[in-house]
């Protein structure tokens, strides 16, 4: 679903509080990224200078930092949508690539520690709840 220039992917799960997403992979690990609308909210029209993802082997908790987005001398935290251990970091990721397409340019792959318990805290992109949240988030950017 598109709202203005922002996209809500129906196959992804979204952490509404932090605007991040996850995709459940066939091996039960999860790919984690940031939504385009959350990225726009963090940047407020500025260009990012760097993206720093927590290293492989790091533990992350739902709602806590998984990455930092640097904007000049300032930094913005990017929240993890799920708890677990980072199994892989996207080594190809750059701030420019993230800005160009935050859905293709994911942050990390996480081995979730409690997926069944934490997944209900997220919304699936194809639900009415997700669509309403997304529309409101886009509206607030204007």
Image (spheres, rainbow, N blue to C red):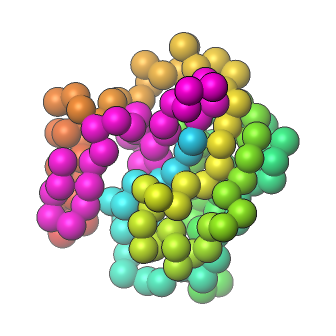
Mark yes or no: residue 53 visible: yes
Magenta stretch contains residue 62: no
- Residue 41: image quadrant is bottom left
Residue 122, x across and y down, in percent? 41, 29
Placement of 107 over or under 50, stated as above or below:
above
Magenta stretch contains residue 21: yes
Placement of 90 over or under 48, stated as above or below:
above
- Residue at 40% of width from left, 34% of height from top? 13
Residue with the most extreme right position: 57
- Residue at 47% of width from left, 47% of height from top? 20
Magenta-tinted stretch: 1-30
Q: Quadrant of the C terminus?
A: bottom left
- Residue 17: image quadrant is top left
Indicate left or right for 40 with 129 as reference.
Answer: right
Indicate left or right for 62 with 131 as reference.
Answer: right
Residue 8, x across and y down, in percent? 27, 48
- Residue at 48% of width from left, 37% of height from top? 23
Residue with the most extreme front position: 26
Indicate left or right for 61 with 1 as reference.
Answer: right
């Amino acid at each position: 679903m598109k709202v203005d220039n922002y996209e809500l992917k129906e196959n992804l799960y979204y952490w509404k509080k932090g605007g991040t997403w996850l995709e459940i992979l066939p091996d039960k690990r999860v790919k984690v990224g940031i939504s385009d609308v959350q990225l726009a909210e963090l940047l407020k029209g500025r260009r990012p200078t760097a993206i720093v993802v927590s290293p492989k082997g790091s533990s992350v908790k739902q709602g806590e930092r998984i990455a930092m987005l640097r904007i000049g001398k300032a930094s913005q935290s990017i929240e993890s949508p799920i708890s677990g251990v980072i199994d892989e970091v996207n080594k190809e990721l750059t701030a420019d690539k993230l800005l160009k397409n935050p859905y293709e340019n994911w942050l990390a792959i996480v081995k979730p520690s409690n997926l069944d318990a934490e997944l209900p805290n997220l919304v699936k992109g194809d639900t009415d709840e997700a669509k309403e949240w997304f529309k409101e988030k886009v509206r607030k950017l204007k």
